[in-house]
Amino acid sequence: LATGTALDKLLAKISHLPHALEWVKEQITHLQPADVVVCDGSDEEYTRLCNELVAKGTFIRLNEEKRPNSFLARSNPLDVARVEKQTYICCKKEEDAGPTNNWMEPSKMKETLHNISKGAMKGRTMYVIPYCMGPLASPFCKIGLEVTDSAYVVVNMKIMTRMGQKVIDHMSPDDRFVKGIHSVGCPLEEGDKDVAWPCNPKNKYIVHFPEEQSIVSYGSGYGGNALLGKKCFALRIASTIGREEGWLAEHMLIVGITSPEGVKKYICAAFPSACGKTNLAMLEPTLPGWKVETVGDDIAWLRVGDDGRLYAVNPENGFFGVAPGTSKDSNPNALISMQSNSIFTNVALTDDGDVWWEGLSDEKPSHLIDWLGNDWTPESETKAAHPNSRFTSPVSQCPSVDPAWEDPKGVPVSAILFGGRRQSNVPLVLESFNWVHGVYMGASISSEQTAAAEGTIGKLRHDPFAMLPFCGYHYGDYFNHWLKMQKTISQPPKIYTVNWFRKKNGKYLWPGFGENIRVLKWVCERSDGKVGARETPIGFIPNFNEFSYPKELDKENYEHVFHISKQSWQEELREVKDYFKKFGDKFPKEMSEEVAQLEANINAA
C-alpha cells in the first residue's frame, strides 16, 4: 500500500477530520490492506462494487425484468447467523456487563484481537465507511466510521444507513464517532486465490468496548456480525450511550396507526428476532378505514420531547428482514419493498433468475438452486432457503412508509407492546396496571427460540425487552434505567404484552397478520379512553363486546385466547422470579415488589 503523500491522497476525503484520519491510519498500519477506499456512498460506487462482487462470484445478478438492480449472495454454511457465544461486552468492570453478556477484561481482549488481526487485510481492499444512524438532520443522530475488507458489507451499509460523502460533510473536526473495525479474517498472500464468501468460522469475535464506543468484528461476513451500524452500534453501544444521556435504544418496530376518523397514533413494539416485527411494521389492515404506516421495523431510539411525551426515531435507512414466511398473505408491503434495488442472502434461486423461499408461495417450484448452490426439488429433504435467509431493501421503497419516518424529532409514542412466541399461558393482549408493571412485563418476556441466532429452535428462553442479545450493560441497571425514565415522561405511553401464537389442539387460535389490526385498534382506543377493559390478576384484557374479533373466532375460542390459568400463572411467576435472581443486588426493589403483588393477585383469584 502506498505511504506518505500517496496515502494522503487516498484519504483526502477525511483530511479535515484529524481524529478520523489518525484512527484510520492506525488501522491501515495494523491491518495492512493492499488498497484503501474512502466510500462516498454514491450510486456509481454501489454499482461498481456490485459488479465486482458479481465478477468475484459473491453475487449473482437477478433477472433485471423481474428484480431490477438486485442480487443474490450465498454465505459460507458456517456463517449464517449472529454468534452470541462469540459476542462480548468488554467494559472495564465485569459486573457492569452483567450475567447475560460474555465479558473479558478489555486489555486481555485487545491483546487477543491485536494478535489475530495483525495483517488481517493483506491482499484485500480496506473500505472506510462514514455512516450515520438516524436522519442526518436530526439533533439525535450518531456518527460511525467502519473499516471493513468486505465489499458485501459496503453495499449493504449503503442500503441500511445514511453513508458516504454526505456524512463526511456533516462531521466537524472535533466530532466524536463510534469506531468500528470489521475483517472477514482471511488475509490473502501473494498468489492466493480468494473464495466467494471469505470468513473464518473457527475464529469469530464480535466485541464491544462501551466506554470507548468502539466495536471490533473478526471472522464473520454475516450481516448481524458485520454490518456494524445495526445491532452492534444501534443497540449494544447505543444502549450504553442512552443510559448516560437519558434515552433508550430498543429492539422495537415503530408504526403509525390511523383510525377511520383520521386520528393517528404511533406504537412501538419489541419482539425477539423472527417473531413478526417486520410483518407488523408493514401490516395491511383487514378492518375497513384503518391505515398502518411504517416508520421502522427493527430498532427505535426513544427520547423525551419538550412536551414531555416519548418520541421514537428509526436510526436505520433500510430493512434487513427474514425472508422465509414472507408472502402476499403475511406481508405484501415487504414483497413490494424488495421488488428492486435489493440484496438477498441465502435464499433459493429460480430457473428464471428470481428468488424463492419457503412460504413465498403455496406451490413450490419444480426446480430451484438452493441456498447452498445445489439442485433442489419439492421432493428434497432440505430447505431451499436457509431459515435465517435475509433481504436488504431501502425503507423508502416500502409502499406503507410513514410520511414522518425521517422526522428529525421523531414521532410521539402512545403505546409500547412486548411479545414473543408462546403457545400457551400468555393472552392475546394484556394491558399493564402502571409503568412499573409494564417494565415487569418487558423484563419477563420469554419466547420460543428462532433461527435468527445460533441455538436450539423451539426452546423457550427468557428475552427481557427482546434485548437479550443486544443489551450493552447489566440488565439490572437496564431495568432501573427504564424505571427512572418514567420520572422524565409527563405523558407516559401505556404498556402491553401481545401474543399472536397461542395454540389449541396444535392449531393457532389467532389468524394473525392483517387481523392484528384488531389488537392495535383496541390499544389505540384504550389510549384515548374510548373503551373499557376487564381487570384480571395480571393486567387488563378487552371486554368481549368492545373488541373487534374476527368472525372465525367464536366466543369459546375468544375465551381461550384470553384464558388465564391460576395454576399455570403461579408456575410462570415462580419461574420468572427464579430467573430474576440471576440479576442479584442490581435487580430493582420496585420490580421485586411488583412480582410479590402479582403473586398475591394470582393466589387470591
Image (spheres, grey):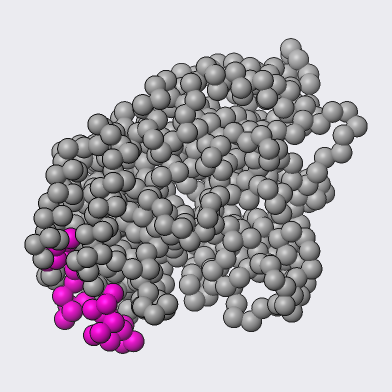
For the N terminus, the quadrant is top right
Is residue 358 positioned above or below 485 on the image? Answer: below
In front of the other: 433 or 246: 433
Tell which residue pokes out farthest to the top in this image.
Answer: 4
Q: Is residue 552 magenta?
A: yes
Instruction: Determine the residue located farthest toward the left in the rendered image.
Output: 604
Nearer to the camera, 63 or 428: 428
Horizontal side of 257 relative to 151 (left or right) equals left
Residue 313 visible (yes or no): no
> Where does the C terminus fall, quadrant-wise?
bottom left
Q: Is residue 149 left or right of residue 329?
A: right
Start-end of magenta stretch:
535-561
Vertical position of residue 468 compared to residue 233: above or below: below
Q: Is residue 345 something one can see in this rendering? A: yes
Quarter of the image holding residue 127? top right
Residue 67 pos. (x, y %): 67, 65
Q: Position of residue 174 (x, y in %)?
A: 46, 18
Report the front residue among 22 and 196. Answer: 196
Of residue 484 and residue 535, the one placed in the foreground of this image is 535
x then y, percent, for residue 260: 26, 74
Report the residue at 34% width, 87% height from top: 552
